[in-house]
Image (cartoon, helix red, strand yellow):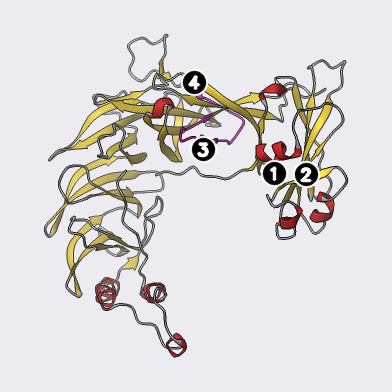
Amino acid sequence: MKRKALLTALSALGMTLVLSGCFFRDADELYAMPQPPQDYQALQVRLSEALDAGGEYAAPLTGEMIQSVQLQDLDGDGKQEAIAFFRFPNEEKPMKIYIYRQSGAEYEQMAVIEGAGTAINAVDYVQMDDDPFKEIVVSWQMSSANRSLAAYSLGPGMAEEILRTDCESYKLYDLDQDNQQELVVVRTPAETAETVPAGTTVAEVYDFDGVVQVTSQAYLSRGITAVASGGIRSGYLVDRVPALFVVSAYGENGNGTITDIFTYRGGELKNITFIQDTAKPGVPGAGESRETVHYYTQVTGSDINADGIMELPQPVPVTEYKINAENISFWLVRWRQFDAEGKPHTVFTTYHNDRDGWYFVLPDEWGSELTLSRSDLPGGTERAVTFSRWTGQDTQEPQPFLTIYKLTGSNRVRRAKMAGRFVVFPSQGLEGADEANTIYAAEFKDGWDCGLTEEEVRERFNVIKTDWSGT
């Protein structure tokens, strides 16, 4: 993936304060009003002109590029251009992107891109061909529910629109490993579309060779209700094959989740987990990625074991002792990698406690004879989950062997020190507990020897971190 230039927010005040902090000064200078470098003062003059004309800063809403003013080498000359995002509320096309080129100690206007939307949802800079000029990809927010995607080719003194399409989400990624990023757009075409059945969501690959055009497309699962916000993520399959993972709400009420996995090889975009509906042979888009459907948990795909390959979750219900099977409270998560043919390969299984913010990697030796239970104290300062061995027969009581506690409140350290308990987070143990607002502790029970030591419990315990992102 190509290196992205450093992006910097340069508001009138912020530019002065941030840029001035990069230099050493003696004691007297520390009390003087800091001054930015001369070239940034020249840029501020141009920004002030747009503000004085009725503009207001309007930074992109999502993505990696969310500054009001950004720096990029757009023409490949080794110097960074400044890209500023404004809204002019009283104009027909209120959204404007000003591009300024540095000329000596001054900045001059290179081009202006205008949009009729209500906001700029996201922006990316990418070289889609061998030309030294980068293309600018902009997702315009037309309304709360509609976006329009456009791409602009830069040249001397101009910005030409080379692509315009409706868009639910998009991703720039080198899918075929040719050192050029492909633009993949996910959208649901209007009923008048000729090549795609109405109501069918597709992923399309766009290539730029003088003209931007769709080179390949593939269907998403038929049962989706909406592509999730930030629902396109790049990653690798087994054997390091690059892929895109598109997450969507699924089912009649949209309470399920489904992930379509796409590869791009030999110029063909393929949904490798898509299974055609045998009841509708020959009907385009009639099918779904059945292996990746899941309900009842908000856990999403992640490289959870940090091996560089994306894992997707498959929830597995846990049978509880003397509890109606229809009221499932606990779920295990089977984490699976996929190969380029769409076949899953299980990596390991975890118990994810979303309410308390932790998960635990289960040893394979624990097998399927496992049940869980909660025992929270009033006030919520001690929340506990107990793992027990159980055959599944109500005539035999579960054998508790491990409890994990979430401890908060002023007495959290004292509770962590109670007999039999040991700290699993923070990693410094009780030495770091005084500084932590939340302490996680564990305790072995006498019901069964689970085969783990205290250190092995710590190694398998993890605090949940959210790292899904997208455009």
Q: Are marks 1 and 2 in contact (CB under 8 Å)?
A: yes
Q: CA distance from mark 3 to mark 4?
A: 18 Å
Query: Of the residues under marks 1 and 3, which one precedes in the sequence?
Result: 3
Q: Which residues are magenta?
A: 291-312
Name the spot of residue 470 as percent of width and height, x first: 42, 43
Residue type at the position of mark 4 = Pro
Nearer the viewer's eye, disc 2 or disc 4?
4
- Mark 1: few, some, or many residues within 10 Å (few <14, many ≥20)? some
Report which residue position mark 2 lands on.
Answer: 383
| Relative to 394, 190 lies left or right | left
Q: Residue at x 21, y 50 (%)?
A: 134
Q: Which mark is residue 344?
A: 4
Q: Secondary structure at mark 3?
A: loop
User: What residue is pinned by disc 3?
Assistant: 306
Q: Amino acid at mark 2?
A: Arg
In the rendered structure, are the residues bearing label 1 and label 4 in contact, judged by CB atoms less than 8 Å apart? no
Q: Nearer the viewer, mark 1 or mark 3?
A: 3
Does residue 428 lie above or below 277 as drawn?
A: below
Q: In the rendered structure, which disc, 1 or 2, sits on the residue that comes first in sequence?
A: 1
CA–CA distance in space, label 1 to label 4: 29 Å
- Dot 2 or dot 3: first in sequence order is 3
Say whether disc 1 or disc 4 marks the residue closer to the N-terminus: 4
**Gap between marks 1 and 3 measured at Cα:** 23 Å
In space, the residues marked 1 and 2 are separated at their CA atoms by 8 Å
Q: Is residue 427 left or right of residue 274?
A: right
> Which residue position is annotated with label 1?
356
Instruction: Look at the magenta stretch and give its main secondary structure.
Output: loop
- Residue at 25% in and 24% down: 266
